[in-house]
Image (cartoon, grey):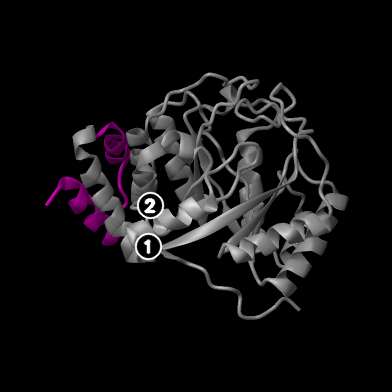
Amino acid sequence: MSKWRKLAERVLDGYEISNEESLSILHSPDVELLEVLQGAYLLRRHYYGNKVKLNMIINSKSGLCPENCGYCAQSSISTAPIQKYRMVDKETILKGAEQAAQLQVGTYCIVASGRGPSNHEVEQVVSAVKEIKEKYHLKICACLGILKPEQAVKLKEAGVDRYNHNLNTSENHHEFITTSHSYQDRVNTVQLIKETGISPCSGIIVGMKETMQDVVDMAFHLKALDADSIPVNFLHAVDGTPLEGTNELNPRYCLKVLALMRYVNPTKEIRISGGREVNLRSLQPLGLYAANSIFVGDYLTTAGQESTADHQMLSDLGFEVDFVKESVPFN
């Protein structure tokens, strides 16, 4: 039995891996990669079987953001040639929800650029969410930036199931990525969501010149925050952003990061998110031995692979789409 399987069995028994053991996953030699993934899969299978949750994004507001996040094509300092538009109308959001239902997507994610939403934008989302709940009974995740307490309450009352606000990077590395908001601003938003009774979703972006210790720190801080869902993004460096040309990742390291997130957060939904196609490349299927969730369709400003290819990948793996509609419509 490999040391990684032994470690996974200890985690199943309630053991919390150490900082040193976490770093050893990222430093593990490539010849041990399948053994690392075997341990991660033992944990994943225990809590989620061979089911995979599907998620889909609608970019409901693009660009026009005052923040200076170095990875983002929508930021105020980006010169990337992207579409820029204000909040789309309710009909557009509903059309996306219809497509999500057709693709057996379990969670439909309404995402908007900006530091945080205006009250009018929150009302637009609330109106759309109520109708989506009535028509399609999908789980809804909103990602609108930094919230005010009263805005969080309105989203909760409308039926928003989950709210995403990523830590993105470690506290130590944060000032190298953005200075227009603090790391604590992000933490505070996740904590507000939890207090409001909405399921917290918070994740990371890997490949932004952070250290391995930064990655480990992110894994443990998400554990401390008790995020229910953890999206793991891999930097897709966009021309026109400060991180243009950054290319630090390879597929094997990306798989080790996914495994690390599973060992540290064994019971949580680990989602392979942005950048999986360009960073995991031909090794994408192996990621699902650690993760149990993926996005289908396009991301915010970059394209994903065809949804039919994602469904074929899951079928080839012998995995099953975890698609359960809400049994009770929103009233």
Q: Is residue 258 left or right of residue 275?
A: left
Helix, strand or loop at label 2? It is loop
User: x, y percentage for residue 245?
Assistant: 53, 19
Q: Is residue 15 visible?
A: no
Magenta run includes residue 26? yes
User: Label 2: few (<14), some or many (≥20) within 10 Å?
Assistant: many
Residue type highlighted by circle 2: Leu
Magenta span main SS: helix
Q: Quadrant of residue 122?
A: bottom right
User: x, y percentage for residue 246?
Assistant: 50, 21
Residue type highlighted by circle 1: Phe
Report the residue at 39% width, 46% height from top: 261
Magenta stretch, residue numbers: 1-28
Report the residue at 11% width, 52% height from top: 1
Label annotation for residue 288? 2
User: Does residue 7 sit above or below 104 in this rendering?
Assistant: above
Q: Quadrant of residue 42?
A: bottom left
User: x, y percentage for residue 119?
Assistant: 86, 51
User: Does residue 202 sit above or below 198 in this rendering?
Assistant: above
Nearer-the-camera pick, 205 or 63: 63
Q: Quadrant of residue 196?
A: bottom right
**Which residue lies under the disc numbered 1?**
319
